[in-house]
Image: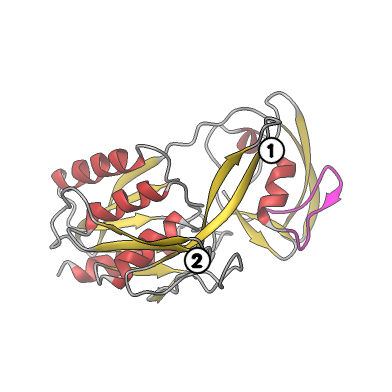
Amino acid sequence: NVQEHPRGLRVASVIPKSPAQRAGLQPGDLIVAVNGRSIAGRPSAYSTSLIQGRPGTEVTLSLMRDGRRFARTIRRAKVSVPVVSSRLRESGGTKLAAVALASFTSGAHGELRAAIDRRLKQGAKGIVLDLRGNGGGLLDEAVLVGSIFIPEGTIVSTKGRSRPRRVFKAVGSSISTKVPVVVLVDRGSASAAEIVAGALQDRKRAEVVGTRTFGKGVFQEIEELDNGGALDITVGEYFLPSGRNIGGGGVKTGAGIQPDVRASDNLRTKRDEALDAALRRLAGKTR
């Protein structure tokens, strides 16, 4: 997981047994060049596209750590990242669940609900929904994930220049609204992740802890071309229950979701300060 930085990409976390870990990358490292090409000032999507490639090929990263520049050559490989991960934590003597959702892929809501139900049965009194680094995914999954926490009413609505307004409401059964929830976000939380965080914030179901999110307020549709290619076309904007759009109007990046409680992780320490702040906030709601 990486975060955009003016000088390149900051390594936020390293997946165990991944090529990055085997090459010695550590949280807090700053990637400043890829194969000798500077990525300073470049969007994270562009920079990560240079790093990614076919399994078995190599890429050389130029990094900064503690003021020292060095290089690491990584052999690319296919890395499987779990969509949902969870663990029990304790804060102030209270047992809490920290549940992370990596993306809104098909079926993600089912995995998330199963993890939450399991942790509640194990005695968790509240839930931190960790959406940091979650770049989004399917709109339907965002609605279904929001419905885990919100029993009824609007989750999100959409509207396009040539499309009528459409309202997506909570479906299915939610967990008890007596279970307190805190949503943890960062600059890498975008699109569907912002829909869920914003819906829970607007509906007063959860407080949002972290830093401002990415600010993507539009959705796309893919149109296949006769030559085998495809066009990814922006066709509309989505709006939170309060009516606010988290984008900047059209395709512009907006202000995103502003947290109720500001917290950020110090990438140079082993502690997860942002998660600790979310757990403390959550523990205070269980008393």
Look at 76% across and 30% down and name the residue there: 58
Which picture quadrant has residue 125? bottom left
Disc 1 and disc 2: Cα gap in Å?
Answer: 24 Å
Give yes or no for residue 24 being in the magenta stretch.
no
Which picture quadrant has residue 5? bottom right
Part of the protein shown in magenta: 29-42
SS under mark 2: loop
Left or right for 130, reference 281: right
Question: Could you tell me the amino acid type at mark 2?
Answer: Thr
Give yes or no for residue 40 being in the magenta stretch.
yes
Q: Measured from the top left, where is residue 182 in percent x and y?
A: 30, 64
Q: Residue furthest top?
A: 56
Question: Could you tell me the amino acid type at mark 1?
Answer: Gln
Left or right for 216, reference 231: left
Looking at the rendered structure, which numbered label has been put on residue 52?
1
Tell me, yes or no, whether the two marked residues, 1 and 2, touch with CB atoms within 8 Å.
no
Using the image as rendered, state which of residue 72 and residue 155 is in the foreground: 155
SS under mark 1: loop
Look at 86% across and 46% down and name the residue there: 36
Q: Measured from the top left, where is residue 246 in percent x and y?
A: 47, 70
Left or right for 69, reference 123: right
Q: Residue furthest front?
A: 162
Look at 13% across and 63% down and name the residue there: 178
Give the residue pinned by disc 2.
213
